[in-house]
Image (cartoon, rainbow, N blue to C red):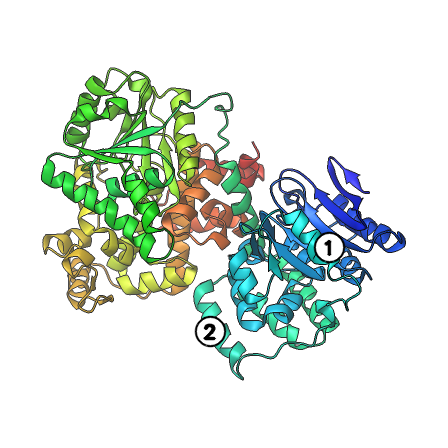
Amino acid sequence: MAETEGARVTVAVEDGIAVVTVDNPPVNAISQAIRQGLIDAMAEIERNPSITAAIIIGAGRLFIAGADVREFGKPALPPTLPEAITAIEACEKPVVAAIHGVALGGGLEIALGCHYRMADPGAKLGLPEVTLGIIPGAGGTQRLPRLIGFADALDLITTGRQAGASEAAKMGLVDAVAENDLKAAAMEFIRARIGAPLPRLSAMDPPTPDSEDFFETARAGVARRARGQDSPLRALDALEAARMPFDQGVEREREIFLELRGSDQAKALRHAFFAERAVAKVPGFEAAKPRQVDAIGVIGGGTMGAGIAVASLRAGYSVTMVEADAEAMARGLGNVAKNLDGYVSRGRMSEETKAELLAKLTGAVDYGALGGADLIIEAVFEDMAVKRDVFAKLDAVAKPGAVLATNTSYLNVDEIAQATARPGDVLGLHFFAPAHIMRLLEIVRAGATAPDVIATGFAVGRKLGKVAVLSGVCDGFIGNRILAKFRQQADAMIEDGALPWEVDSAMEAFGMAMGPFKVMDLSGLDISWAMRKRQTATRPAEERYVAIADRICEAGWLGRKTGRGWYLYEDGKPSPNPDVETIIIEESTKKGIARRQFSAQEIQDRILHAMINEGARIVEEGIAARPLDVDMVEIMGYGFPRWRGGPMCAADIIGLDKVLGKIREYAGEDAFYWAPAPLLQRLVAEGKTFADLNRG
């Protein structure tokens, strides 16, 4: 059998059944050795008269997780995956895929090439290629609809989602779910089918769409969900080709696959894939070991504190929540229960599990209750005096070695840490609302923070299911610092001639889930208003200041929670607030600004280039260790379209020389705001990219 760098396929014959085992730790990825090994295994099965049937199974904890990431973006070495699958399907002896763990991407395509499929009850199956900017390229878009029909195939392929074993059985994706031992069940299953006609998906007639306008209707829905990403729509093109004879459909699928593989979107999504895995491997912290954390304390039971408590409970921690008084504590505990009710109502949690989690939650009004906590997270009002008072109290009650974390969004973590006699134990854990749902966690390293405290933050973040990113101390850290520049540019454009809903529409067309003014309304305009007032004393005199948002706040319009902000929310849906337009025009007139039109492209360009320029400064100052850290913060916490790879990746794709040229063009209008980042200028001069910095 083939074997390269530990990757191998073995064949063991047990009572006439060939057990073909794919073994390529840790996830049985499909490397060249695996592809060749499967072809060799099928040849051995065909020529050995003592073998009557076969099962294909994965070694270790799963079946096959897809392509080998080391081959991403590179031409595949022969044999190709379609050749391996053809060899399996052409086998004259029955073959069943025994699926445990996951069968994803090429792994599921291999299973579809088998004559039958059996799954372990905990197995997950899917074709997630669209999340990498491509489509299945080994017959997946042609075999899957022949097996389960167009509607279910459309759902799986254009979203990239995974189906559990039970769902897969209902839709016909697997023939059976093993009740006990998967291997034994698969051997019994395939033995019963020896001599029966072999069902080959490639030989089946093309499926019939559910309706005459099926693909037309599907295209509108996919386009709406894709928000500018190409691969879901191209996957639909490939699915539609399944109406043709199999060979023609496969040829069309391959054409689309190859077109997408070298696209900018595929490059960006590959970058995001690798960056998400690299972001936790922070240079300089490789040797740091995390402290043990079993019990977490949360100070504050509001929206953020309750969300942190829910995330912690679901991760298996016991939680003690402290509030100012009994009434506030009752509200906090109620907030936690309400969040858990949301999981129950969506079918993601049972009432029994909810009760078990609530049993691990304790409420208190005395800081002394935090004495047993290994990690204490402060989630109180965003005010330095309040936070320093909290940490001074923690100094007296927290046990030695406990990690003390602040959830501040903007404030100086060094200053907060100075309120304690143990600044080495202090760090920032900046959660994003809602904290039990949003995946981003900014881990803020203060000047005195101990390395093992940083390692603890990453370990806890991983257990919470977060994508954790290390940030240094500055106003707003990585994400909110870039957001400030984003909003500053949006504010300038509405003062110069654009309207908030035009900016929102342009950025949603760019791929953002929600435009900046809608986001402000959602989070509450008073939050950024408080920040602006705090920055008044230190704001440079030459910095352009747009007072439109201040006037809206002064009118008491704070967004959704007051029924109006940039938009009106009379029926729960946003509609332009005409009074806001009046304020905008008054402010423009007051400054003598001749308002002009802004195209959607110019709006997108100005905001993107502002993000890139500030991201470069953040990397240069060491606030972010690498450009990829900036990208992950923006994708995971701020709705930046993943298929653009983050602002720094987007800059590389555009070309840093072109980015710098555009920023210099804007600097002719406002030299203070648009001063090009020195790092950006240096990279252009040296002919390097942000990707070069990611590689170290």
x then y, percent, for residue 655: 54, 49
Q: Give the foreground label among 1 and 2.
A: 1
Q: Is residue 335 above or below residue 586?
A: above
Residue type marked 2: Ala
Task: Using the image as rendered, state which of residue 685 and residue 515 is in the foreground.
Answer: 515
Q: Quadrant of residue 133?
A: bottom right
Label 2 sits on residue: 220
Vertical placement of 37 versus 368: above or below? below
| Structural distance between the alpha carbons of marks 1 and 2 | 32 Å
In screen coordinates, is 664 left or right of 38? left
**Residue 407 shows in the view:** yes
Q: Quadrant of the N terminus?
A: top right
* Nearer to the camera, 105 or 9: 9
Residue neighbourhood size for the residue with mark 2, other residues' Cα within 10 Å, grouped as few (<14), some (14–19), many (≥20): few
Query: Circle 2 sits in a helix, a strand or a loop, which is it?
Result: helix
Dot placed on the residue nearer the N-terminal end, 1 or 2: 1
Residue at position x 75%, y 47% in the image: 19
Category of crowding for the residue at label 1, using alpha-carbon neighbours closer than 10 angstroms: few (below 14), some (14–19), many (at least 20):
many
Disc 1 is placed on an element classified as helix
Q: Residue at x 69, y 40 (%)?
A: 24
In which quadrant of the rendered image does the C terminus lie?
top right
In the image, taking residue 674 as reference, residue 389 lies left or right, namely left
To which residue does mark 1 refer? 81
